Image: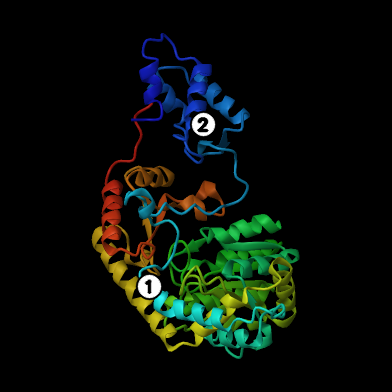
Amino acid sequence: MTIFSDFTDANSAAATVDARGLEAFLRMRISQGTLPAGTRLPPIREAAWELHCAPGTVARAYRGLVVAGLAHGEVGRGTFVGAAVEGVTFPPPAAPAAENGGAGLVDLALNAFRMVDPAPLLSPALAEAVARLDVGQGYIPAGGERSDREAALAFLSRWRDDLDIDCITVTGGTQPALFATLLALRDQGALACEALTYPGVLSIAQAVGTRVHAVAMDEQGMCPEALDHLARRGGIGAVFVMSGRQNPTGRIMSGERIVALAEVAARHGLTIVEDQVYGFLSPEVPASFSRLLPEQTVLVSGLAKCVSPVLRVGYAAAPPLLNRRIRGIESAMLLMVSPVLTHAARLVLKHPDFERRLHALRCEADRRAGQAATILPDVRAADMTGGIAWMRLGNGWRAEDFAQEAERLGVRVSPSRHFAVDTRAAPEAVRICLAAEPDEGRLGEALARLASLAGQAGERPPVAP
């Protein structure tokens, strides 16, 4: 079955394929929802081969969809259903199995650490926060209550020494912390990121009007020589890095690499935005940008990954002047973070079970990587750290074709394009979130489906000359 199977069946008696008829068929499929937004239409020559018509007929039908705003073309990639998207967006979560009689997708696209239940730690903290809430209290001071910043100080000190409590801003999560930081840094110039990076930072850069430059990366992440070359050209003001666990590849930066990149940043006066939202996965932190260059680094982290997305509390630690700007922007966006959440976060961070939870998450992430290694033998061990499997595709697969076919088989993964600064240079690979599915049996079945699919040929039928 292909996109055009119904069309060819319905028009089998017709002598020729008409562009208007083909366009009408595609419009109908789009309106019915059977061609959802983001679906890549077959390449023109391949479609023409299947439909036994001239390529120009298919091209005119596609063009009609584009003019109508029902599709868009991307250079070097093809034609896609839906209007062109400005910037990068997050994929929607899959429907829970309970909503679909157990037939919901196994969602391995959105990265969440759901394999260790947070309820024993989080539920009592939320209950106590609500019980102690003074509903008549006024607004929390900008930057957060001192007691909340004191709790954050102990948490952030694993990545930075001699941190001043007045340099910490409590935020509504890591994402708002990044948003406030990049907005505060906008006037310094463009942002340098690894060629494959966290899509949320690309969305923020798009929203605040900051240009993003891709920096070449290797097995340890960002390459110092490439950053130095980019900085020498001028126009770069800040660098975004995830040294603890890189998203989407899960790679870990060595202490030597961090030192080399810090030297480049110091030499060119670049501000480093160090995202440590996955830093809890490393029990020991031999080096960090926040330790090496505290006067040039903004450290951001939060509790959504290590505790639960329900606990929307994050933190930014920055040099005094920059912290005041971040604090002002955060206040302008939110006025304040909910005191229920900040109080619960404080209780969680001070509870002895918090460190035990981090240890359990690390152990489970390692165990799941071992499980995945037996099912996905072609994925290297270095590409299965931090609850992530970065699977490079062979057998002629394109990443988006593989992701679409995997979703048809009941498993959602993220194609590399979601993470690429330059989508045209995205490798043929997908990110698999090993920690997202709480049920180990469902995870194993999903990985087996992905392994089977990857072993099949991804080539399309031959096209007519």
Density class for disc 2 (Cα within 10 Å; few <14, some 14-19, many ≥20) is few
- Tell me the number on the disc at residue 239: none
**Residue at mark 1:** 117
In the image as oriented, which residue stretches furthest toward the bottom? 162
Q: Earlier in the sequence, mark 1 or mark 2?
A: 2
Using the numbered discs, state the Cα–Cα distance from disc 1 to disc 2 in whole angstroms. 41 Å
**Residue at mark 2:** 31
Q: Is residue 348 above or below residue 205?
A: below
Residue 427 visible: yes
Q: Is residue 301 above or below residue 182?
A: below
Image coordinates of residue 17 in percent, x first then y, are: 45, 15
Image coordinates of residue 50 in percent, x first then y, are: 38, 23
- Snapshot quadrant of residue 115: bottom left
Q: Is residue 454 left or right of residue 254?
A: left
Q: Amino acid at mark 1?
A: Asp
Q: Is residue 94 above or below residue 224?
A: above
- 361 or 294, nearer to the observer: 361
- 152 or 132, nearer to the observer: 132
Q: Is residue 415 above or below residue 464?
A: below
**Image quadrant containing the C terminus:** top left
Q: Is residue 78 left or right of residue 6?
A: right
- Snapshot quadrant of residue 116: bottom left
